Amino acid sequence: MEGCSFMISFACSEDEQSLLDTLGRFAQNQLMPDARAADRRQSVDPAVRGAYREMGAHLLGLPDAAGGIGFGLTAKILAEEVLSRSDAAQAVGLDDLGLAAQAVVALGSEAQITQLLGDAERIWALASSEDDPAAHLGYMSTVARRQGQGDVLSGTKTCVFNANRADRLVVLARHEDGDGLAGIAAFVVDARASGVQITLEDRMGLRAGQPCRVQFEGVAGERLVGAADPVAALTRLFDIGRIINAARMVGAARGAMGFAVDYAQDRKAFGKPICAHQGLAFFIADMEVALESARNLVLKAAWQLESGAGATVAACNAAICAAEAAVKVTVDAVQVFGGAGFMKDMPVERYMRDVRTLGNALGTPEDHLAVLGEVLYGPESLKSAAKDGKKVAQA
């Protein structure tokens, strides 16, 4: 269009590149060697966690008022990609503030942000996922009811990473008379309060991220009350989660592809490396195409988010494409290794398990498609998708 200019730059600043280089070395030297053991014991080594916190990396993406270290959300997103190339599960396990802190920033008052995030040693976890597939569309079964001057929460959350280590939980719950996103509010809960029961889940992937099932029975919660437009703030929170998760999937898949490429160069068949056979060469080239496409959508979504533009469509596009690409690439990486790819001492099988779990951790691709449907066709499509999701859950 005449008179219209549009330019996006994905270039990092010198400080951002230095940060990513440092995190890349940290991941290669500390996460990668311990990845298999961390997967088995379902935890990050305390020494690794201490080194990560000493760098201040757990504060990435937070504003200065919330204890941030001067790097925005794009740096946080790129950092998660870099860490996940070595081990996405430990990347999740190291995220001691994560989306819970982002929820406090997005939905809390200035006083709440200062009070709740003032202690950098405190560990947070976000409790948003539920067994019902409609939960990510705003139709949650965890309910907040008024009791006296406050609120009490009842319900069950699943796949709550780091909940068993957390000091505080940010719980997304539906008001008893609410519906959709407009009926959802965020509450801060003491993770050790009476009525909170936390159980470590035995999931296929992201085991070092310590996914937990959390049950609430009449638990008091402090409502976050600072957002001028709570629906917009919640939407932004979900967008941040989608983009970070997509970056982790791209990073993990890139890590798996790296192992596949190295193996294809070393393994010989019919007198030459298997990568010299056109069929396998094309196989690996397809991985590159899928990953580069997904990564560019992640970068575009991050740029839109940080620029203040609406990022929901871009975030959903990135999440959907990253999930599809990551599953394809990690499965294909296992295939490159042949039967050896299914052995536990081969890292590619771990990458494959982790991206499968990442693809469902903050909403399935179908959830993201339903959100896209709402944006493209109006809110009725979201209500229909949520009803269909409930029917599936009840079947």
Image (cartoon, rainbow, N blue to C red):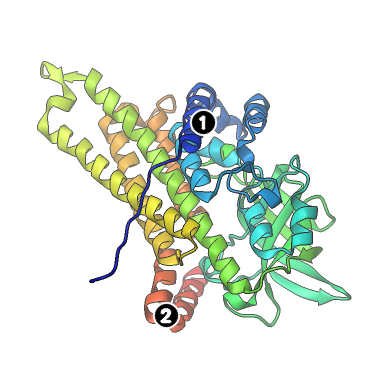
Residue name at image x 70 percent, y 76 percent: 175
Residue name at image x 27 percent, y 35 percent: 335
Residue name at image x 60 percent, y 39 percent: 93
**Front-most of residues 119 and 34:** 119
Drawn side of residue 370 relative to residue 36, left or right: left
**Residue tagged by mark 2?**
381
Which picture quadrant has residue 220?
Answer: bottom right
Drawn side of residue 174 relative to residue 11, left or right: right
- Relative height, residue 212 to residue 267 (above, below): below
- Relative height, residue 125 to residue 131 (above, below): above
Coordinates of residue 367 in the picture (x, y in percent): 45, 65
Coordinates of residue 264 in the picture (x, y in percent): 23, 25
Say few, some or many: other residues with alpha carbon within 10 Å of mark 2 (under 14 / 14 to 19 / 20 or more): some
Secondary structure under the numbered disc 1 in the rendered image: helix
Question: Which numbered disc, 2 or 1, marks the residue that appears first in the sequence?
Answer: 1
Residue situated furthest right in the rendering: 148
Which picture quadrant has residue 179?
Answer: bottom right
Coordinates of residue 369 in the picture (x, y in percent): 39, 67
Give the mark count. Answer: 2
**Residue tagged by mark 1?**
23
